[in-house]
Amino acid sequence: MASADRLRKNNKSSTRKAKRAPLRRAPSKNSRKEGIVVGASDLKWKAVQVPDTLGDFGGFYGLEEIDGVDVKVVDGKVQFIARDESKVRQSNGGNSSDQESSEEKQSDELIEFKNLDDVDEGELEASSFSETSDISADETNENEEQEADDNASAHDDNDELQPNVFQTDIDLDDIEVSELPEWGKLGPLSLTTLQGLAKLGFSKPTEIQSRAIPVAMQGKDVMGKAATGSGKTLAYGIPVLERLVKSKNNTSPVALIFTPTRELAQQVNKHLQALGKAVLKNSPYAIIPLTGGLSIHKQERLLDYQGSGRIVVATPGRFLELIERNTKLLDRFARIETLILDEADRLLQDGHFEEFEKILKHLGNSRRKNVRDQGWQTMVYSATFAMDLFSKLSSTSWSKMKRDKHSDEMEAVLQQLMKKIHFKSKPIIIDTNSEQRISSQIKESLIECGPLERDLYCYYFVTMYPGTTLVFCNSIDSVKKLNAYLNHLKVPTFQIHSSMTQKNRLRNLERYQQQSEKNRTLNKSTVLIASDVAARGLDIPNIEHVIHYHLPRSADVYIHRSGRTARAEKEGVSVMLCSPEEAQGPLRKLRKLLALKSGSDETANKKKKWQKTVPLLPIETDIVTQLRERSKIASKLADNEIASTSLKKDDNWLKKAAEDLEINISSDEEDKDVILAKNKTKKINKTISKDRVRGLKAELDELLGRPLRKDLRKKYLTGGLVNLADNLVKKRGHDFIIGHEKVDALEQLKKKRSKH
């Protein structure tokens, strides 16, 4: 029996509508039963149950099937012939207008293939996937990973691509321009932009936005410097969106925005989409992200669609890969009106500009060949523009880190940038934080501890000061170890580092934000542990504390790390864990660099000792003593977990390599490699038996069940000057330490600073 399959979109109406065909009898032939010629929307389609592991079949968004229906192609058009009237929808006899509306809605869900030549081979073959029942484990895993990668992208791929038709009537939801008078002073902003600003809650512009937007909307090149969290994204995003709204050509590219990390690219894309939501109603793919870690084939399909990618937010590596694969994309993006470099200070560092140089060379050559004009508008933004901030704190001597006292910081950086980037004219320099490098909203602090006590004092901090905390480590191994350590201590933790797949990084960020929202109402800690991949640009809401588990390698990284808190005019705390050896080396250099202000020299800061620029965080030794035994056990369990996982990966890698080379490797031959043998021995020494693991976990659970007490000398809750039992009943005081008042790191540092 023949069957018919159709493709159905899952959300709004398709751009191609199938017209309902009138019912008519098909002539009988030989012994075949006479059938009824019907339209596709007249049939009782049944949804095909698609396994989750099969993704979207490379572009199919939903399948339906029906039995007992023949398919014929007559004059290049598809006809459906039903031999059983039970397969045909019956009229309900209701109001004719309602019926027509229903028919139109059904027809909107169909994609009509007027000619089979219009159907891609992939689309014709897709239906066969639904009949596949035997899928190997390897194929399933690969498909699951690809599906998760695709689902992690900024756009929901269940949305069918729409033609690039911008709507002319924008529903402002009763929002008037007069409600945003401060924004109106910056220039004639479109209703689309004003609507987006109002819905996002931005009632007035920040300083960088007030100064940069009018200049950018005049088409001038801009070099902007502002503190982290001060709204740099909208400072360049609003002028770009205005170009998109006012553009008469609905297909030409408007802007390229480059960011150093994938997470930052996704974040910028999200902000621009929220701002231009009214425009994107009829052109949902006008703003898209292009980053590594996600399907390049899907990104190519998006770019091939007419009207998509008019504003592109990209990481350099993926964008370079795309234009080198397809010269048509290169010629298309060479016609951009604006080029934006976010976190542009990275361009000044060695090893970070090669991909940009290639991209700029490709785009420049194509533009001179095809466009022949003065070039595009260029805007560069960052929180730090200073050559001395990039010096290695651990190796560079202080004498080499001094800046010429007569030089202007921004001018010196601009001269370097102009050697690498072709500006139309000398950029307008906009510096909104020339007098300080760390925002005044950030309260800095220091915890002095031994090199092997970082875990203990990190645990002490999140126990003493519950809240949303972001911990930065210098190595991926440290991120993994600290994550396992805090998990064993029942602290909710999530991790982000460059070795993770993009889908897992995005997933952990989302889970962290969800968990922090829940724990905030319960006054509990939620910890995100990250490498410096999360140091730049990421706007993670409501980060209260930033902990530098290791001192950063350079001063600019410290500034960007600390800038993850105290965003959008809020306050926050930045705490460094530092050993005595580091205090006299890297820490000293860091504090001296941060004390230098733009256009000043070291002599201006000699009177103030660097030790006084950062206060010590008060430490309660009796609480640390109670946490020490827990910390030791958790550290052993974490070492065992990390070492066991690493040994398994090493063994699997070695076996796979041997199989690929078709050789046998014995354990004796493996031990002959000195380096491999040392690493393996080191890991084995950190592992413990399963029985020992169970014993340690039981011991740790028993310790975690004991309440922490501020004064160990008190044997009874009702003894002493304070009735602890009464405080517990009335829920007064610290949530996790009996006899301790509720404490806030920010308030403690404010009090300490006021005393000084």
Image (spheres, rainbow, N blue to C red):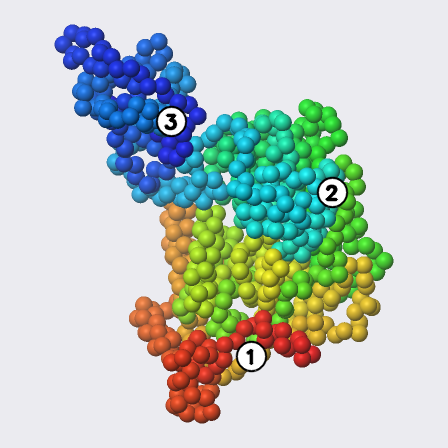
| Amino acid type shown at disc 3 | Asp
Q: Nearer the viewer, mark 1 or mark 3?
A: 3
CA separation in Å, label 1 and label 3: 66 Å
Q: Does the residue at mark 2 contact the one at mark 1 (Cβ under 8 Å)?
A: no
- Name the residue located 60 percent from the left edge and 62 percent from the top edge: 570
User: In the image, residue 446 lies at what x, y percent?
Assistant: 61, 72
Name the kind of residue labelled 2 in the image.
Val
The answer to whether residue 205 is left or right of residue 51 is right
Q: Amino acid at mark 1?
A: Ile
Pinpoint residue 536: horizontal percent, then vertical percent: 60, 54
Mark toward the start of the polypeptide (2 vs 1): 2
User: Please, what secondary structure does the residue beneath circle 3 have?
Assistant: helix
Q: Which mark is residue 538?
A: none
Q: Which residue is mark 2?
A: 215
Q: Is residue 126 above or below residue 394?
A: above
Q: Quadrant of the C terminus?
A: bottom right
| Residue that carries the numbered disc 3 in the rendered image | 108
Q: Residues within 10 Å of mark 3 (few under 14, many from 20)?
A: many
Marks 2 and 1, how far apart at CA = 49 Å
Q: Is disc 1 placed on a helix, strand or loop?
A: loop
Q: Looking at the rendering, which quadrant does residue 395 occupy? A: bottom right
Position of residue 288 measured from the top left corner of the image (x, y, whole percent)? 54, 38
